[in-house]
Image: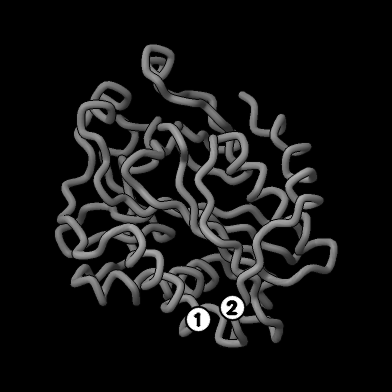
């Protein structure tokens, strides 16, 4: 099944910014798609550690108040994600099917390809029977939307927001999560992950190359945000407040 639109994708160069700005950028991407814009893809990092909550999440670690951690609500579902020692991605496009499992598999293929090149083959997970005891953390369990290592450790957690035929999918690629902070927030250790053989710039290059081959073969055109677009993003920042 071919899931790509026939349009080139827009590549928004990597941005490091606070939590509210990053979530506003993801919302803005979906708005642009709904207004007739092209599909988009971006990678980003958080300027300070942040805890992002699923749009309907009612329980989250109270310990965040004692840490230098920002709190923000995602437009997508799921549980809390600690954004520290990781790389986040976001994409928007119009899949020709609403089969969410098929769309997840398509939207994660480029991630699987890139990580396989790093010697870390990933497969889709299954919910853990112990998840109920760790309900606040996204990485406490892996579902059919998530990618896990051969040893069962969750490496990438993803979530979706559908708006009619338009999709926003974003996710967190764990690299070197801070064990002490993770333990204080979630009372469990982070997933046991082997280090990847690439530095930050090479990782981003490999991910972009994999995206061009497996997600957006019609093209991936780099285009930073204009001042007018940044103004529109800033106007959306309050939507992420908890």
- Secondary structure at numbered mark 1: helix
Where residue 233 sits in the image (x, y, percent)? 73, 44
Crowd rating for badge 2 (residues with CA inside 10 Å; few <14, some 14–19, many 20+): many
Q: Is residue 235 above or below residue 204?
A: above
Q: Nearer the viewer, residue 130 or 89?
A: 89
Where residue 60 sits in the image (x, y, percent)? 45, 24
Quarter in which the C terminus is drawn: top right
Residue underneath mark 1 = 212
Where residue 70 sits in the image (x, y, percent)? 49, 26
Q: Pointers 1 and 2 in contact (CB under 8 A)?
A: yes
The numbered mark, 1 or 2, whose residue comes first in the sequence reads 1
Kindly identify the residue that appears in the image at 62 percent across and 76 percent down.
221
Kindly identify the residue that appears in the image at 19 percent across and 34 percent down.
189
Q: Is residue 58 above or below residue 220?
A: above
Left or right of 227 on screen, residue 26: left
Q: Is residue 14 above or below residue 7?
A: above
Residue underneath mark 2 = 220
Kindly identify the residue that appears in the image at 72 percent across and 64 percent down.
166
């Amino acid at each position: 099944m071919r899931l790509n639109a026939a349009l080139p994708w827009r590549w928004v160069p990597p941005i490091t910014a606070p939590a509210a700005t990053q979530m506003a950028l993801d919302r803005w991407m979906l708005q642009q798609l709904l207004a007739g814009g092209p599909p988009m893809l971006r990678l980003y990092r958080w300027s300070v550690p942040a805890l992002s909550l699923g749009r309907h999440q009612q329980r989250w670690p109270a310990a965040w108040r004692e840490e230098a951690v920002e709190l923000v609500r995602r437009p997508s579902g799921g549980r809390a994600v600690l954004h520290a020692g990781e790389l986040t991605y976001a994409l928007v496009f119009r899949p020709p099917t609403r089969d969410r499992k098929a769309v997840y598999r398509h939207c994660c293929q480029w991630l699987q390809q890139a990580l396989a090149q790093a010697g870390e083959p990933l497969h889709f997970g299954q919910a853990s029977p112990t998840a109920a005891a760790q309900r606040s953390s996204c990485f406490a369990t892996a579902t059919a939307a998530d990618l896990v290592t051969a040893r069962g450790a969750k490496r990438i957690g993803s979530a979706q927001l559908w708006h009619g035929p338009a999709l926003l999918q974003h996710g967190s690629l764990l690299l070197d999560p801070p064990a002490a902070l993770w333990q204080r927030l979630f009372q469990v250790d982070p997933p046991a992950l082997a280090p990847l053989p690439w530095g930050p710039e090479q990782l981003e290059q490999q991910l972009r190359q994999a995206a061009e081959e497996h997600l957006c073969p019609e093209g991936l055109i780099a285009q930073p945000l204009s001042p007018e677009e940044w103004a529109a993003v800033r106007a959306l920042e309050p939507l992420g407040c908890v």
